[in-house]
Image (tube, rainbow, N blue to C red):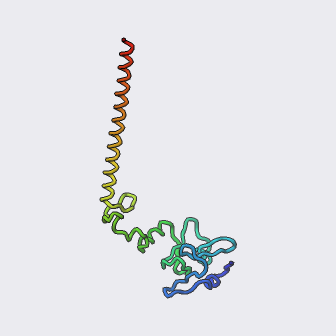
């Protein structure tokens, strides 16, 4: 498929009630997709390319309308990956934002330094479990070491007694 103009691109889209131009051909993960000169494109990125030229390296074409299949240039803007993530959080599209309780049913109250939410009850329980496992493991190793030392001392005594007789 060769698109030389925005009109031919828009002819493959349908105007929605919300004002979006929804790509009608191939979709991949909710995004419009097409092939131009043997190169695969996301439809919204190709729309940006037709209207504005090359997309700078490291930049993303973002949707102000939150409709992945929309190719309308007025609904598209450039941003970085960070901009994209902040936009997602601002628009409450982050699936974990909607979760209020951990899988065990405890309310999320703890935010670790990296930013992921943790249930305080489960974090503390995990720490205690890890600590207790390590204590038991250390006690077991200490017992094994003491048994080896005792066995070595017994063997040394037997050697001394057998030599002195």
* Residue found 48% across the figure and 79% down from its top: 65
Picture quarter with the N terminus: bottom right
The C terminus - image quarter: top left
Question: x and y percent of residue 52 in the render?
Answer: 60, 76
18 relative position to 115: left or right: right
Give me the residue at 33% from left, 52% from top: 127
State the image quarter where residue 104 is shown.
bottom left
Label count reads: 0
Left or right side of 78 for 132: left
Establish if 61 lies above or below 21.
above
Residue 100 in the image: above or below residue 159: below
Q: Residue 71: x, y in percent? A: 56, 79
Left or right: 107 in relation to 81 = left
Task: Look at 37% across and 21% down and name the residue there.
Answer: 156
Give 159 or 84, whichever is nearer the viewer: 159
Please indicate whether residue 114 sits to the left or right of residue 57 in the image: left
- Residue 133's spot in the image, x, y percent? 34, 47
Residue at 48% in and 77% down = 66
Q: Is 47 or 145 nearer to us in this picture? A: 145
Toward which corner of the image does residue 73 lie, by quadrant?
A: bottom right
**Residue located farthest toward the top when viewing the structure as drawn:** 165
Foreground residue among 23 and 50: 23
Residue 92: x and y in percent read 41, 73
Snapshot quadrant of residue 47: bottom right
State the residue in front, 21 or 160.
160
- Asked if 54 appears above or below 163 in the picture, the reply is below
């Amino acid at each position: 498929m060769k698109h030389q103009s925005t009109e031919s691109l828009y002819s493959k889209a349908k105007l929605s009630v919300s004002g979006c131009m929804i790509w009608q051909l191939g979709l991949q993960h909710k995004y419009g997709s097409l092939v131009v000169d043997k190169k695969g494109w996301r439809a919204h990125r190709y729309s940006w390319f037709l209207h504005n030229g090359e997309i700078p390296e490291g930049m993303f074409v973002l949707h102000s309308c939150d409709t992945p299949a929309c190719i309308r240039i007025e609904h598209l803007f450039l941003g970085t990956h960070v901009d994209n993530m902040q936009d997602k959080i601002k628009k409450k599209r982050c699936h974990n934002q909607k979760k209020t309780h951990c899988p065990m049913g405890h309310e999320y109250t703890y935010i670790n330094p990296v930013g992921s939410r943790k249930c305080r009850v489960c974090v503390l329980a995990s720490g205690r479990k890890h600590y207790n496992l390590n204590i038991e493991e250390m006690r077991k190793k200490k017992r094994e070491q003491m048994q080896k030392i005792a066995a070595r001392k017994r063997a040394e005594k037997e050697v001394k007694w057998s030599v002195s007789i």
